[in-house]
Image: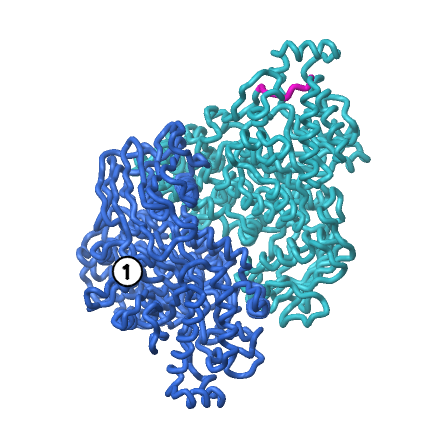
Chain colours: A cyan, B blue
Amino acid sequence: MRLSTLLVCGVAVLAAGLAQAQSVPAPAPGMPSPALMPLPASMTAGQGRLAVDGGFTVALAGPADPHLEAAARTLIQRLSAKTGQFLAGAPVMTGSAPGKGATLTLMVTGVSADIPAPKEDESYTLTVTPGGASITAATSIGINRGVATFAQLVANGPQGWAVPAVTIHDQPRFPWRGLLLDVSRHFMPIATVERTIDLMQAVKLNVLHWHLSDNQGFRVESKVFPRLHQLGSDGDFYTQDQVRQVIRYAADRGIRVVPEFDMPGHTTAWLVGYPDLASAPGPYAIERHWGVFDPALDPTRDSTYQFLDRLVGEMTALFPDPYFHIGGDEVNGEQWKASPAVQAYMKAHGLKDTAALQALFTTRVQAIVAAHGKHAIGWDEIMDGDMPKDVVVQSWRDAESLKKAALAGHAGILSAPYYLDLNWPAGRHYAADPLPENLPAGLESLILGGEACAWSERLSPENLDVRLWPRAAVVAEKLWSPRDMTRDVSAMYARLETVAQDLVSAGSRHEAARTLLLTRVAGPAGLEALLPLAQTVQPLQDYRRSARRPDAVQSTPLNRLVDAVPAESAEARAFSLAVDRFLANPKDVEARAAVLRPLMAWQQGNALLAPHVAATPLLAELAGPSAKLAALADAGIAAAEALHTGKPMFDRAGGEKAVADAADAGAELDFAILPTVTRLVKAAP
Amino acid sequence: MRLSTLLVCGVAVLAAGLAQAQSVPAPAPGMPSPALMPLPASMTAGQGRLAVDGGFTVALAGPADPHLEAAARTLIQRLSAKTGQFLAGAPVMTGSAPGKGATLTLMVTGVSADIPAPKEDESYTLTVTPGGASITAATSIGINRGVATFAQLVANGPQGWAVPAVTIHDQPRFPWRGLLLDVSRHFMPIATVERTIDLMQAVKLNVLHWHLSDNQGFRVESKVFPRLHQLGSDGDFYTQDQVRQVIRYAADRGIRVVPEFDMPGHTTAWLVGYPDLASAPGPYAIERHWGVFDPALDPTRDSTYQFLDRLVGEMTALFPDPYFHIGGDEVNGEQWKASPAVQAYMKAHGLKDTAALQALFTTRVQAIVAAHGKHAIGWDEIMDGDMPKDVVVQSWRDAESLKKAALAGHAGILSAPYYLDLNWPAGRHYAADPLPENLPAGLESLILGGEACAWSERLSPENLDVRLWPRAAVVAEKLWSPRDMTRDVSAMYARLETVAQDLVSAGSRHEAARTLLLTRVAGPAGLEALLPLAQTVQPLQDYRRSARRPDAVQSTPLNRLVDAVPAESAEARAFSLAVDRFLANPKDVEARAAVLRPLMAWQQGNALLAPHVAATPLLAELAGPSAKLAALADAGIAAAEALHTGKPMFDRAGGEKAVADAADAGAELDFAILPTVTRLVKAAP
């Protein structure tokens, strides 16, 4: 028995040998196939490989694009981090003597603007031969896309690090491929924002949707209305210099920054400093709870629009992107219904309900935004009304609203199936196409793309990467790669672990943070005692966490086991695949061993953990889940033995009870292995 | 058998239950004793505990010290990182209503200067009761020391995070407690330098000795001689603004920054831009090899001293510390012997050898430094001559030179036994006292302290923390804590793992980097296949790595197994302790199991790794070591079985051969477990 693999991490199983829908043929015997995500539109294998070693240099060719050198530096840092070699710090201009070893030439035919535009030519051609490589694109934007692919192609092989010979022609399926980062519910420091941008670049995401204000915090410095950040941020905000720094950082990576100032709801933090904006008198305090709240800007007073005109004026000057997100979601209308003045206004203007009043508000704000030279984008609620076609709709409630928007002539982007904070497995995000079903032909061009969303009620700077990566990469692939290439969920999972490792070399802390957080939870029990439980659980999905813990607030610590474990357990997935193979051939000794090994390790976990459960509150809440795991693993072992021997399952009733008890793991967790153990028990004689 | 502990990390064993020479009594049943390093001079336990929860706030009291708020912010960040709670971002001034929950008051009686001085009052009193805590000190320097202790005291217990009630009176044994960071052999980016300063603060180190120039790079911007950094740095240097940033960052933590410009040897990088400074004609190129090289500044020409006067003038203005390190080590005199002009000069001036010529150089440079208002410090070679007593001597060759310096009236600091890059185990550093033996009483005050040294021939920004932490903490303790408290090596090890965890929360990447580097080495084999070997090896100590690989150069990758594993294997240490217990009672079943478990896991490693050794060069070099480990583990198992059963050891000859073969592990490694397995084999019947 291979005892040392008892603490099974499904990595080796996943990465080795599973079929890929489209693979780069191994360039030499024994050299692994690199895993690409997003998959390129078109790829042809060549012969041989191009070494990436200490002599590797980068040359720039074409007109002097302001971001081209930055793209080269990004690549060199990525390769240094991935391979652990000291690579030349500075790119080499063409015409200089190439360094010994291979050269990668980055060639542009044109010059990018200072900041990326909404519809750039992001296509590139990547050619790799044993003699050298080149990435050719219209501007540095396409170069950034090719650089991301090149970095993913680099792998270690019998002769060292290399890129396989290949020719790639690539361009995105959708032009708007975003990540929403909610820095209001929990603030994310600048370094965290920049690291997120690095990781976006690695998977070709090109829009940072910066959700800068909400009930829980107004996070950007305003010089015209300083009480917004002074009183609405607990001191956690970005200065305007920092905003410019982030915009430059993103532009160097071909990434747009779209700011959101969500209104008229989600504005409690504004009202702390400016209570007169509200539809009911103050005073207001920063909202510490989660949910939908009553305070809303007063749409019936000119003073509101005068304020917004000045604020939008300031912010549209600070943020150069042509789009300006005005939010518009979750306005419950309660303050409007309770306000006699607002009710009187509605009556006088023939507004039949609060939705109509919101539509009026949206119309006036859109006009302000347009007057400042920007295009407005808002959440799908803003479509309840007669909006100019220019307004882009972001669908979060369902894909149907995206279709409605397109039918009404609005461009739109889809977020509904891409909420990363709801802890869905990667496959569930991957199964959702950005194009609504049955969209009339001819309207497809109105679907600009979509955005993965990182709402931060239960995200901190500490666990952000655990929550985002690598799952954001599968959304990135849905938005970049041709539709027919993104249908095979198993093939996606076969690439995902290697992609996740590549993201670590791009700076992702999802592995290191998981270990750090688990070690903190384990405390005096020690990490090894916690790992069995940690490998078998996942956070509750959808909105079940908030339903289970409605008293959670902004300051509620995110330091529990549920905050440490990724949305999707790799060990559980590997276990499921092992059970698949076992159920197909239960007499097979190897297949049985592959199922029993993890089950026995998980069954042992409680003996290791139980002695320590009184040591700290972080451990105390795990007493129940740990005991349930032991019983669940027992049931799995008994079922597997029965399947293998053909004899009836030992203590079926106890096993079925363990399965039933495990439906509610406790501590805001689900047992990721429960469906698989259930299959075993059901199948057992 | 506790199968899940097969991948034994000695952590749980080390941290639990081993006696501490001086412990803080657990404040409540089940609450662990915090581990402090450095140990405070005086500590008395109180009753109860002070909760550190979401209501925790910090108040400042006393005159407005410019660094006091920074010290408070540092503490709050440390506590947030350690506990995973969202703690208040801003300290609270006294007089404001204290937040709900405990308050820590930081009280100074005086005000610190803008930058720390060489002999500050670093003493502090820390008082913790269930009602609140206070740290009182002369200035923010002592507050920084107390803050470091407070952060180490915080631990999780049955009622959550808390500090045990305690009263501590503390002050350092030595005033100069430094870390030399060599940024010339391999450049360390600003973020790395700042992270290192954070970790220094955590263990009360108070001098960053910034080794800024050497043969391999001149790393700081010079405006008066720009070709120094333009031609001597490969573009990797600190701007003067960045230098000021680092000095401020350090000052906020009560840490001095002492710059070193090593001369007249170790200057090849200067000579690329200014070859006329040398004692032989150029041209010169940046030195890429390691070792001692011939180029040296020409001490016979006035132009050399005119250059140095301007450079020292510039750098003494940039670096505000009163001390200026002029180096002076490893001058082999070859260029001087080969130069007719220099030989003529020596003859004319009655200088009998190159040592005398160097002494002349040192005298003139010291005068320049003094003329610019600074005190010179240099390596112990500069004592070969008639130096002003003002010059401080840094002893690197041996402790004897420190004694000689003191006898000659020079103050000195000791580095010889504190070279972290030589990969000694912590206990070996800990056994070396900074005070030379048999130093006449009355001269003790001339021993200012010492410095741990991080020479970076085999250090990169990636593995720096693996090389420095936690071992630098034991040097910090030798320099801070009373001598009688720092004699017990076992007790030190009992605290070290918990201290290492605390350093992770202070930002150390030693754990995360180890995992990242090991994962990269493992490549297609997977981390689990590599761990058995990784747990059992250590890098060659002393200068054996350079002897084994004399062809290593600046660009030689530091991405191999030897670069990933820490100097000291925790698993090997735990194994040694387990074998101690087993040898005392070989019939005991538990003791036998504790020895066999790791041996069997290590014995299995080769079966996991061998199939992959052709996959990459990083794995290919491990084929030999992995096979040797399997044989060594076999020998240990056979010996343990023989001891347990009383029967003669199976295949003793084979076992003894395996032990002999393991003396040279290969791949620049030693088997950390070899001495322990040797003990087993020798003891076996």
Q: Is residue A583 visible?
A: no
Residue name at image x 48 percent, y 41 percent: A462
Q: Residue B78 location in percent, x, y?
A: 41, 43
Q: Residue A269 location in percent, x, y?
A: 56, 27
Q: Amino acid at mark 1?
A: Tyr
In front here: A338 or A169? A338
Q: Is residue A297 magenta?
A: yes
Q: Residue A140 location in percent, x, y?
A: 71, 54
Give left or right: position of B532 versus A271: left
Give left or right: position of B437 versus A302: left
Whether residue B516 is situated above or below residue B272 in the rendered picture? above
Whether residue A455 is situated above or below residue B17 in the rendered picture? above
Looking at the rendering, the stretch of residues picked out in magenta corresponds to: A294-300
Residue name at image x 56 percent, y 50 percent: A503
State which quadrant residue A335 falls in.
Answer: top right
- Callout 1: helix, strand or loop? helix
Q: Is residue A206 magenta?
A: no
Whether residue B239 is situated above or below residue B70 in the rendered picture? below
In front here: B500 or A638? B500
* Majority SS type along the magenta span: loop
Give left or right: position of B57 versus A139: left
Give left or right: position of A474 versus A384: left
Q: Is residue B20 visible?
A: yes
User: Which chain is indicated by disc 1?
Assistant: B
Q: Which residue is mark 1?
A: B430
Whether residue B37 is situated above or below residue A319 in the rendered picture? below
In front here: B579 or A338? A338
